[in-house]
Amino acid sequence: MNRENAKPRIEGFKVLENECIWMKAGVINFRLCDNDYDCHTCPFEKAMRRAMDMAAKGDSRREAPQWVSHLQRRYDGANRPCRHVLTGRIPGPKICTQNYECYHCAFDQMLDDIDLGMEIDAPRCRAVNGVQMADGYYYHLGHAWVRFEHSGRVRIGCDDFVTRVFGDLRPAELPPLGAQVYQGQVGWSMARQDRMAALLAPVSGRVLAVNHQLRDHPELMREAPYHHGWLFIVEPDMPRRNLKELYFGREAERWMDREQRALLEMVAPDYVDLAATGGQLIRDVPGRFPHVAWDELVKRFLHTQPARAT
């Protein structure tokens, strides 16, 4: 999965700047950020710190990376721009008042808190043989989507395929705040009446926020799966390693096309060849095609074992 580029690069959603902070500090001539400005998990950041004898000891937040001292020398006083201006996270001007010691900056913490609670922008979507797919999102084989946001946090939800095929789903059990989820293992469950479906977590990480709106408005998952219908946000562990099991771009489109053909083989095998002609994806398979077993849908498309609601 995601093997079109030999070297994985995290594509952050609406991250417009992409110059590495070491480049902006003037330490190196040229390098583009490939880790969504998540310096804490960036291999290049760690390599630079080792090369400059600045490897973290103890509390890594208090062991400043070398780019900090370069920025401190390059800018001073009222001319010192906030690093979030340098990386494009916020528009300028914004002056750094903490001498680039972000670990005790109230504004830095506020940005992270705002990101968790703020209304997200709707992505641009395109139809792939009747299934909506969001540009800039990653997809997991269990039909969860992944949206990398600034500083590496990840927003997760169910894709349009699941919300169409399985019908009126509602969240049965979402992970609580602080819980750890693991890529490829069951992360949460959905329900339709007395039938349950477990879904695989698309990345590994710690849960930071949950979309509680879905309790009262589960229809958001169906009406806006890539926008208001998101499920939860995680702080990912080793995000670049997670990319190996995710689909992106054209590879994601080809995977979704294969999934649609597999669905047609289950529902109406005589019409499989029509999948290539486009049109709308079959909706509400359990309700409209009772000969297709719920358990088979769950096993084939969610890659988990079915269960019954209690």
Image (tube, grey):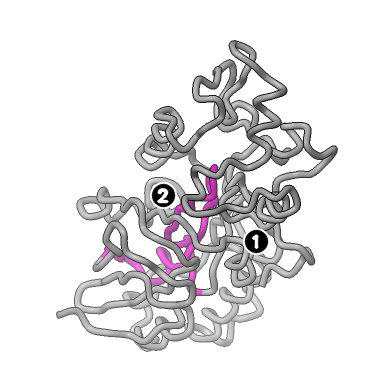
Q: Residue 58, image x and y in percent?
A: 48, 54
Q: Earlier in the sequence, mark 2 or mark 1?
A: 2
Q: Residue tagged by mark 2?
A: 224
Q: Give the number of the mark in front: 2 or 1.
A: 1
When the figure is inspected, residue 246 is found, relative to residue 227, above or below; the finding is: below
* Residue in the foreground of this view, choosing between 7 and 278: 7
Q: Which mark is residue 32?
A: none
Residue 110, image x, y percentages: 39, 32
CA–CA distance in space, label 2 to label 1 = 20 Å
Q: Position of residue 183 (x, y in %)?
A: 48, 72
Reply above or below: 79 against 24: above
Amino acid identity at mark 1: Phe
Q: Secondary structure at mark 2?
A: loop
Q: Nearer the viewer, residue 70 or 118?
A: 70
Q: Which quadrant of the rendered structure holds the N terminus?
A: bottom right
Q: Rate crowding at label 1 as few (under 14), some (14 to 19) or many (20 or more) other CA atoms within 10 Å.
A: many
Q: Is residue 168 above or below residue 195?
A: above
Q: Which mark is residue 248?
A: 1
Please provide the residue range marked out in magenta. Answer: 142-171
Residue 39: say if magenta. Answer: no
Quarter of the image for residue 157 reads: bottom left
- Where the C terminus falls, by quadrant? bottom left
What residue lies at 75% left-to-right and 52% top-to-bottom?
A: 51
